[in-house]
Image: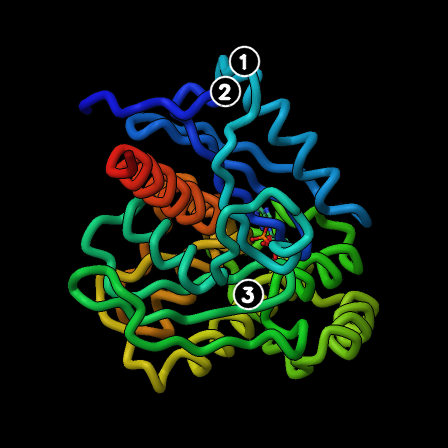
Amino acid sequence: MTSLPVKHGDAGAVAGIDLGSTTIKVVIYDGSRYIARIISASFDPAATASALLAAASAEYGLPAPPVTIVTTGYGRRTMKDAALTPTEIACHARGASFLLPGCRFVIDIGGQDAKGIRLSLEGNVEDFVMNDKCAAGTGRFLSATGLALGVPVDQLAGHARGVEPYRINAMCTVFAESEVISLVNQGVERGAIIAGLHASIARRTASMVASLHPRPPIAFTGGVSQNCDIAQKLGEELRQPVIVPRDAIYAGALGAALMAWDHHHMSESEVRKSP
Ligand code: ADP
């Protein structure tokens, strides 16, 4: 990688920050390497993001946090110093194309929404669908029902893999929680209930994206992509392989960091042109 002019104070590195509904993700990138860090969201997303950025910058070996920052996600407008505030759709598309080169479709399931994004051959967004009106089929649905079953969200897949799913009828998070409790009381095995919840998320997501005619390679991103049983069931519903790239939970923040990199160097070349 060729060396590029350094903007004072940031040693050439830039940052992308995804201020999500559930977690805040920071990626620091210098054109050849990146680090990614995550923390739970708080009531003061800007302060939490700044603290995570400072910690990540120190870990990266920077004397100070990068000057060029691009923010995305639910709280993207809360940070005053952001150079750009692109949508999560744009950032997830960019990040997924980086993590899975040639990717033609992205399915992102986060804490509070689910999205399907169709990409052109060049990686541009052609079309998208989004459910951000209801927690059904999102990470919140999983966390709430997991809590009702006494299983932490990162252990759900382990309980469900290879178990015949019990059909869960309720899609609303509140009703699903009570259905789950009543099934436990009827003696239905916990693994079968969890597999049923995963199957309902996979069915719902597949039907949400059906109108966009997903095509491979399909990248699965966002926190819920860390659940390998949902990834497998989603692939079965779509009848196509679903790939969870490394760092899939950071796709939005990484896309923001790549945009920050472009912005940073565009600014540098503009500066060089001026007298
Ligand atoms: P947002 O960007 O909206 O804050 P994330 O993409 O960080 O959301 O996703 C958060 C959701 O991901 C949580 O609600 C949780 O259900 C799910 N999740 C996070 N980590 C894991 C994991 N290790 N295994 C399974 N699910 C996870």
Residue 41 shown left or right of residue 35 in the figure? right
Residue 239 shown left or right of residue 113 in the figure? left
Give the position of the N terminus as an image quadrant: top left
- Do residues under tags 2 and 3 come within 8 Å of each other at their CB atoms? no
- Give whichever of 255, 186 is nearer the camera: 255
Label for residue 168? Answer: none
**Dot 1: within a 10 Å radius of its alpha carbon, few (fewer than 14), some, or many (20 or more) residues?**
few
Image x and y of residue 180, in percent: 75, 70
Q: Nearer the viewer, mark 2 or mark 1?
A: 2
Q: Which residue is mark 1?
A: 63
Q: Which residue is mark 3?
A: 198
Within 8 Å of ligand 1, the CB of disc 1?
no
Quarter assignment of residue 173: bottom right
Q: Nearer the viewer, mark 3 or mark 1?
A: 1
- Do residues under tags 3 and 1 come within 8 Å of each other at their CB atoms? no
Residue visible at 80% across and 60% down in the picture: 148
Q: How is the image coloured?
A: rainbow
Image x and y of residue 124, in percent: 26, 64
Disc with the residue nearer the chain's start (2 vs 3): 2
Looking at the rendered structure, the kind of residue marked 1 is Pro
The residue tagged with tag 1: helix, strand or loop?
loop
Q: Which residue is mark 2?
A: 9
Residue visible at 24% across and 57% down in the picture: 103
Looking at the rendered structure, the kind of residue marked 2 is Gly
Disc with the residue nearer the chain's start (2 vs 1): 2
- Spatial CA span between label 2 and label 1: 8 Å
Q: Nearer the viewer, mark 2 or mark 3?
A: 2
